[in-house]
Amino acid sequence: MPIELVWGTGTATTELGAFDAALSGANVHNYNLVELSSIVPEGATVDRVGELEPGRWTTGDLVATVLASNTSATPGERIAAGLGWELADEGGVFMENEAPTADACEQLLDANLDDAHRVRDWNWTGERETKVVERVVDEDPGAAGVVVAAVFHPVSAGHRDDDR
């Protein structure tokens, strides 16, 4: 099963609007996102796609994701969010974090993946990978958001993606 990694940034007059705009940047804003607890199924792959293909699923579909996000309405503030992951013969794990900078987010992801190793006696086969998005909040329009999401697949029956 391919898991698609998408990310986006956005601005709006409110933090919620900025979060929605960031989801739009990843093209996942028209789906109902169901957040998962970060476990990668055995045999899955993670593909960096940037944004989902338009019209892929039906508006309102339930789409399973591991989601990292961050928003702020403080002009000049830097925000970051990211996912880190590592695969094993048994499956794999995602870790999601938010932080004030990309460097701080990378450090948290690395520490959390180290912790994941300590609680799982798995045969880790993949390289540790991360995707972090960072943005500075502009005064106009006043709020910014960043998101990184691992998209698994729609949960509802109304999707159009018959190839997966």
Image (tube, rainbow, N blue to C red):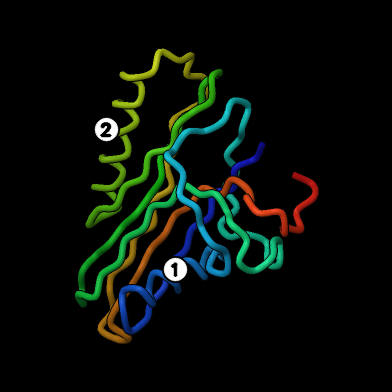
Q: Which residue is mark 2?
A: 111
Q: Quadrant of the C terminus?
A: top right
Task: Locate residue 144: give its quadrant.
Answer: bottom left
In depth, the one of 64 and 70 nearer the eye is 64
How far from the left and from the top, in percent, is residue 54? 68, 67
Residue in the picture at 26% in, 40% down: 107
How far from the left and from the top, in percent, is residue 62? 58, 57
Q: Earlier in the sequence, mark 2 or mark 1?
A: 1
All told, the count of numbered labels is: 2
Q: Which residue is mark 1?
A: 22
**Amino acid identity at mark 2:** Ala
Label 1 crowd bin: few (<14), some (14–19), many (20+), radius 10 Å: many
Q: Quadrant of the N terminus?
A: top right
How far from the left and from the top, in percent, is residue 147? 42, 59
Check residue 95 in the rendering and tell me which mark sits there, or answer none: none
Residue in the picture at 44% in, 68% down: 22
Q: Is residue 97 left or right of residue 57?
A: left
Q: Residue furthest right?
A: 162
Residue in the picture at 48% in, 58% down: 7
**Amino acid identity at mark 1:** Ala
Q: Is residue 81 above or below residue 141?
A: above
Q: Is residue 31 above or below residue 34?
A: below
Q: Is residue 97 left or right of residue 154?
A: left
Residue in the picture at 42% in, 73% down: 10
How far from the left and from the top, in percent, is residue 141? 32, 86
Question: Which element carries disc 1, helix, strand or loop?
Answer: helix
